[in-house]
Image (tube, rainbow, N blue to C red):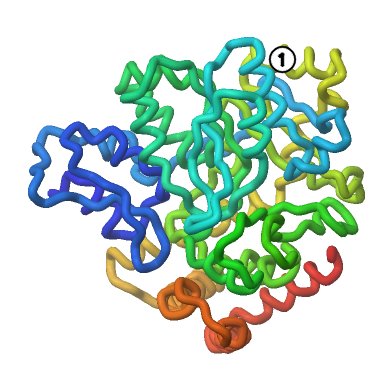
Amino acid sequence: MSHTIIEEVVQHEKCSCCGMCAAVCPQKRLTVRETDFGEFFPHADKEKPCPDSCRLCLSLCPSAHRASPATLRTHQTFVGAVSQESERLKAPSGGFATALLCRLLEEQKINAAIVLTPTTERPWFKRRIATTADEILQSRGSVYHVIKNDDVLREILDGPERQYAIVALPCLAKAIRLAQAVLPKLQKRIRYVFSLTCGGCNTLHVPDLLTVMLGDRQAEMRYRSKQNAKNALDFSITLPNAPKSSSIKMLGPFGFLWGNHIGRLIACRYCTDVFAECADAVFMDAWLPEYIPDIRGTSLAISRSAELSEMFAAMFQDGTLQGGTISPDKVHESQASLVEERQLHCQIFTALESQKSRGWGISPSPEHRWGKRSIAFHSDMRNLFRYYSHRLARNPNWYSRFYVIRLFWLIFLSLVRHRLLKKTLQSLRFLRKKG
C-alpha cells in the first residue's frame, strides 16, 4: 500500500500545484519542480527516507480530499467597486479584494499580505509578501496559470512572527485549511484566507504561447487590461512595459484555448469548488446583464464572517467602495454556467476513472463517450504543447509566430479527429457575439 503523495497523487497527474506538501514536509524531502508539461509538481529526494508513520503530505493535499460542499455558504454578499475611478480602471474587475487587503493592513489586523506580483521572466508571476499598501496595489491583477507557492508558505512558517492574509485559488485555500488543522503555527500566522472563483488553472505552456504571440519574452504580462474594451468581458492580455505595445483579446485566441480547456491542469477535471468554500471571503466578476456593459468592471464578494461583513459595510459608508449588498442567488447566477459545467465534468471524469480502474467497457452514455474523446484530445494537446514550449517558446526566433499558426491548425484538426468541433464552434459563436 502506497503512503506518499508522489505515489497517490502526483503519479496519477492529479496534483493541483498548491505546493503545500513541499512547504511543510518535516524531512525536507519534497521540492517543487516544473514538469515537462509545465506543471509545478512535488519531487521526492530518494536519499531522504520518508517514515511509514508520516502521512502529513496526504493529510493536507486538496486533491486527496476532493469532496466539496455543493451549497453556496455565505454570511453576506456584496456588489460594487472602488470609488476612485483611476484605481477601478487598474483593477481586474471592481477592486474589492485589493481594497479589503489595504483596509486590513491599515487597521493593523494583518502585518503582511501574500499576493502575486508580475515579473519579466518565467513564470511571469511570483508570490510576494507585501507589507505596505503600495505593494498590495502594485500586485493587483488576475493570473490564469500555475505559480510556485512553496517558497512563500515556507517563509510564513520559518520567517518572523506576523499576521498574514493570503489570496489563493480554491485548491490552495483548502490546503491551507487542512494544514492549519495540524500545524498550530500556520493557524496562528495566517489570519485570513481570501480566494477568487475558479474555472480551472492552466499550465505554464499557455503563457509560453501567449508571450510568443505578443512578441516579447522579457516583459511583464497582464491578463486583464481594460484598454479599448467594449464591455466588462472585452479585456485583453498585454505587455504594458514592452517597447512595442501589443495585446491579445481574451475573447479571441485565449478564449478559444480556455473554452476548450487546452493547457488545463488534469486535477481541474475533478474539482467543483468554484466558490472556494474554505475561504473567509471570495471575490469574482459580476457576470450579470446589468453590470457587463460597464467596461470599468464590477466586483462581487462573498463574506463568510461578521467581522469581514462589518468591514465591507464600513468601506461603503466612508466612500472607499460604492455599491452595497446583493442577494446570494444573484451571486450564484453570475457563475451558474461555470458551476454547472464543473459539476458535470467532475461527474463524467470521475465515472470514467472508476470505470477505467475496473477495465474499460462500452458505455451507452453520450456524456461518457464525450468524456473519453475529451481525455484523448487533451492528451494530444499536452504532448503538442510540450513540444511547442520546449522547442520554440523557450527559445523564440524569427519564425516562432508562424509556428503559432501551425499550432492552432493542429488544434483544429485534433478537434475534428476527436469529434469535439461542435462545442468549439458554439464557443466561437459565443466569443464573436460577446466581443
Against 139, residue 228 (above or below) is below
Residue under the point 49% across and 49% down: 271
| 245 with respect to 229 (left or right) | left
Q: Nearer the viewer, residue 103 or 50?
A: 103
- To which residue does mark 1 refer? 311
Q: Nearer the viewer, residue 101 or 292?
A: 101
Q: Residues within 10 Å of mark 1 (few under 14, many from 20)?
A: some
Mark 1: secondary structure: helix
Q: Nearer the viewer, residue 246 or 58?
A: 246
Q: Nearer the viewer, residue 288 or 17?
A: 17
Residue under the point 61% across and 82% down: 401
| 215 with respect to 432 (left or right) | left
Residue 59, quarter of picture: top left
Residue under the point 73% across and 45% down: 92
Locate residue 416, reporting x and y percent.
59, 87
| 202 with respect to 132 (left or right) | left
